[in-house]
Amino acid sequence: VSEAVPKWKALLEETGKHKAAEAIASPSDYANLFPDFERCLSIAADTDAARGSAVPAKEYAQHRNDLFRDLLNQATSTNGAVAHEAEQAADADADAGADADDNDADEFHEASPTTEQ
């Protein structure tokens, strides 16, 4: 992050977006604006280490809800098991909604007019 922020700001300056460049704060310069930044980096590193390797693309559907997990909340929860169960329930609800969306998409394609004559 500390290398990316100056590059991002420079790019914004080059394109004339001076106010946007001034508004960007770096966690290394303004730690008070990012109170959990170091803890989040630590949690992310621990999560990556526990996973071991990247998830293969063919398994994306099984892991897509991992993108929405609140790892900081889960790690700081007084009862991690309760937080984990709540996330599993949310994942199940999201999967059910995704399946319904997939069915809606199939119905849409079946009902769409064709251009063939």
Image: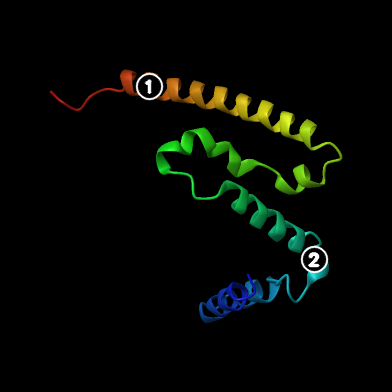
Left or right of 58, for residue 12? right
Query: Dot 1, how many residues are within 10 Å of its Cα: few (below 14), some (14-19), or many (20+)?
Result: few
Label 2 SS: helix
Residue 116 picture location, percent across and down: 15, 25
Tell me what residue is drawn at x 48 percent, y 44 percent: 55
Is the residue under label 2 in contact with that under label 1 (CB below 8 Å)?
Answer: no
Kind of residue sitting beneath label 1: Asp
The circle drawn on residue 14 is none
Residue 22 picture location, percent across and down: 68, 76
Residue nearer the viewer, 73 or 105 = 73
Q: Quadrant of the C terminus?
A: top left
Q: Residue furthest right?
A: 78
Left or right of 47, for residue 114? left
Residue 58 picture location, percent across and down: 40, 38
Residue nearer the viewer, 73 or 93 = 73
Q: Is residue 12 above or below residue 67?
A: below
Q: How many marks?
A: 2
Residue nearer the viewer, 63 or 11 = 63
Report the Cα–Cα distance between label 1 and label 2. Answer: 46 Å
Kind of residue sitting beneath label 2: Leu
Residue nearer the viewer, 43 or 90 = 43
Label 1 SS: helix
Q: Is residue 57 above or below residue 44?
A: above
In primary-sequence order, the first of circles 1 and 2 is 2
Q: Residue furthest left?
A: 117
Left or right of 60, for residue 9? right
Q: Quadrant of the N terminus?
A: bottom right
Residue at the spot of label 2: 33
Tell me what residue is drawn at x 67 percent, y 53 percent: 46
Residue 78: image quadrant is top right
